Amino acid sequence: MAATWTAHARALGSEVLAFLLAADCPGCGRPGAVLCPDCSRMLIARPVLRVTPGGVAVHAAHEFDGVVARCIRRVKEDGQTLLVPPLGAALRTAVPQDWNGALFVPVPTSRAAFRRRGYRVPELLLRAAGRAPRRMLVSTGSRTDQRGLGRAARAQNVRGSMRVRPPLLAPVERGADVVIMDDVITTGATIDEAARVLRRARYRVVGAVALAATPERLRHGVNG
């Protein structure tokens, strides 16, 4: 048995080493680096504040641009979860200190996205930020891809796309303070829908956090 585990460990180590040798920095393309020192410094939080159309204050660690955007895409599209720890460190510094007693509720990942990736990005980021994700929201499966949708279309698309878990599956006292978390905020439609269903279930939404917020110049473009 010990020999079998040793063989598995060696095989896994070989795979990780092969990945590292083949890796290129997502920020600048430098070969042989999961994240080069220069681009790593670009992940130090530069907090921004957004307010959604529904009035939820969202504290984001960065604008969704440049090195940060490329790292997030690598995590979401290419499975490079080795980038999660530095991204989580940035998220941690964006959380206001007076929210420490709140429950952190990630927006639900669609079933299709979970099958494709094998993990839930908001939950990975929350754990890397030192916060325990509370899976109080679940996807209803009614939402389609948001890319290319404007503000009004996004709001319509997410309406009814999530619900609160039954009390037996999410045993949290009604009236508890909650903070909604998403990896990227664009128009704020997803955050607003999460806030709507949580408030309807008698939770108190104190705000939201995100790793990155889409810059103003892009929110009025094709991304809505």
Image: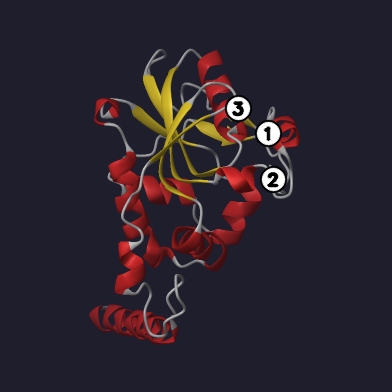
Q: Residue at x 35, y 28 (%)?
A: 103
Q: How many marks?
A: 3
The residue indicated by pointer 1 is 158
Near mark 3 (Cα within 10 A), the count class, few <14, some 14-19 or many ≥20, is many
Q: In the rendered view, would you say 208 is above or below 8?
A: above
**Helix, strand or loop status at disc 2:** loop
Amino acid, disc 1: Val
Q: Marks 2 and 3, how far apart in space?
A: 14 Å
Residue 114 visible to the viewer: yes
Mark 3 and mark 1 residues within 8 Å of each other at the beta carbon: yes
Quadrant assignment for the C terminus:
top right
Separation of residues labelled 3 and 1 (CA atoms):
7 Å
Residue beneath the point at 31% across and 84% down = 10
Amino acid type shown at disc 2 = Gln
Categorize mark 1 by other alpha carbons within 10 Å: few (<14), some (14-19), many (20+).
many
Label drawn at residue 193: 3
| 117 shown above or below 8 | above
In front here: 15 or 76?
76
Q: Position of residue 189 (x, y in %)?
A: 62, 32
For the residues bearing labels 1 and 2, Cβ distance under 8 angstroms: yes
**Disc with the residue nearer the chain's start (1 vs 2):** 2
Q: Nearer the viewer, residue 168 or 142?
A: 142
Secondary structure at numbered mark 1 = helix
Kindly identify which residue carries mark 2: 146
* 58 displayed left or right of 138: left
Local crowd at mark 2 within 10 Å, few (<14), some, or many (≥20)?
some
Classify mark 3: helix, strand or loop.
Answer: helix
Q: Which image quadrant for residue 206? A: top left
**Which residue type does callout 3 highlight?**
Glu
User: Which residue lies at the image location 52% right of the left edge and 37% below the top edge?
Assistant: 107
